[in-house]
Amino acid sequence: MKRNYTGVGLIVLAVVVLVVAVMFYGKLSGNDRTLNAQGTATVKSLPDEVSVYVNIETLKDTAEEAKDENSRITENVQSFLRTAGITNVETMNYNIYEDFDWTDNGRKSRGYKAVNVLKVKTTDFDLVGKIIDISINAGATNIQSVNFELSDSKQAELKKQALAKASEDARLKAESMAAGLGARLGKIKSVSDSSYNYRAYPMLDMAENMATGAVKSAVEDVIINPRELEVNANVNVVFALK
């Protein structure tokens, strides 16, 4: 008889353990149910600054001569720009290398070329033509491009707006999906910002040896109606489901 009671006790214990396990699994499964939603948003804005990329190239017999001549012209360009009150100038690229002419008989050295690309930035779009005139007249080889851009402060402002709108978009999508599934959204499990970007655009790509007057005229034409820039944001949100 004692042995039978022991057997019954073991069976009851096993049933209790099974019931508890099922209840725990059901509860755990319910908490593990999630819904993943991706939100996107685009915010547009006119550019608030412009960068003129000034190219200065010098070709000499030796690398030292090319460097010295390039430095002289670069300082000349910067000096004239400073005199005009334009001081936001930085070197974007600098390189010295041996240049060659290529023929059927092989290559022939032309000497050493020094290349310095200056980025001249301003928030006054009316100064673009003046920057070009000063740079070319001071000895710059050509103007690589004129890029309309967003300042750091403007980028931060627009990024905040874009991310907020993308987050709202993610919640709206999640609510719609949950309703369609007969469920309700619970707490947010995780949020990630998968991307944010904006790309400046060149209003004008300058052809080498383009006449200064033609460059200035072209720039003045496009400044009248600058194109809006787009700031894009994507967020990924994981919600718990009730």
Image: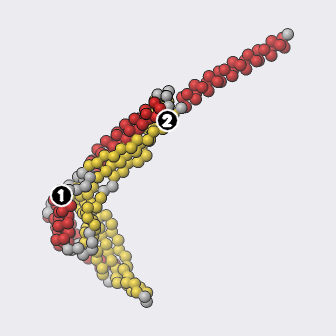
Report crowding for label 2: few under 14, some 14 to 19, many 20 or more residues within 10 A (C-alpha). Answer: some
Q: Residue furthest front?
A: 180
Q: Residue furthest top?
A: 1
Secondary structure at numbered mark 2: strand
Q: CA distance from mark 1 to mark 2?
A: 48 Å
Report crowding for label 1: few under 14, some 14 to 19, many 20 or more residues within 10 A (C-alpha). Answer: few
Colour mode of the rendering: secondary structure
For label 1, the residue is 224
Whether residue 73 is visible, yes or no, is no
Please give left or right for residue 116 compared with residue 106 in the image: left
Residue 76 position, x and y percent, is: 20, 71
Q: Residue at x 29, y 52 (%)?
A: 229
Whether residue 146 is visible, yes or no, is yes
Q: How many marks?
A: 2
Please name whichever residue, 22 or 175, is drawn nearer the observer in this view of the structure: 175
Q: Quadrant of residue 214?
A: bottom left
Q: Residue at x 84, y 14 (%)?
A: 3
Q: Earlier in the sequence, mark 1 or mark 2?
A: 2
For label 2, the residue is 35
Secondary structure at numbered mark 1: loop
Residue 119 position, x and y percent, is: 27, 63
Residue 96 position, x and y percent, is: 35, 74
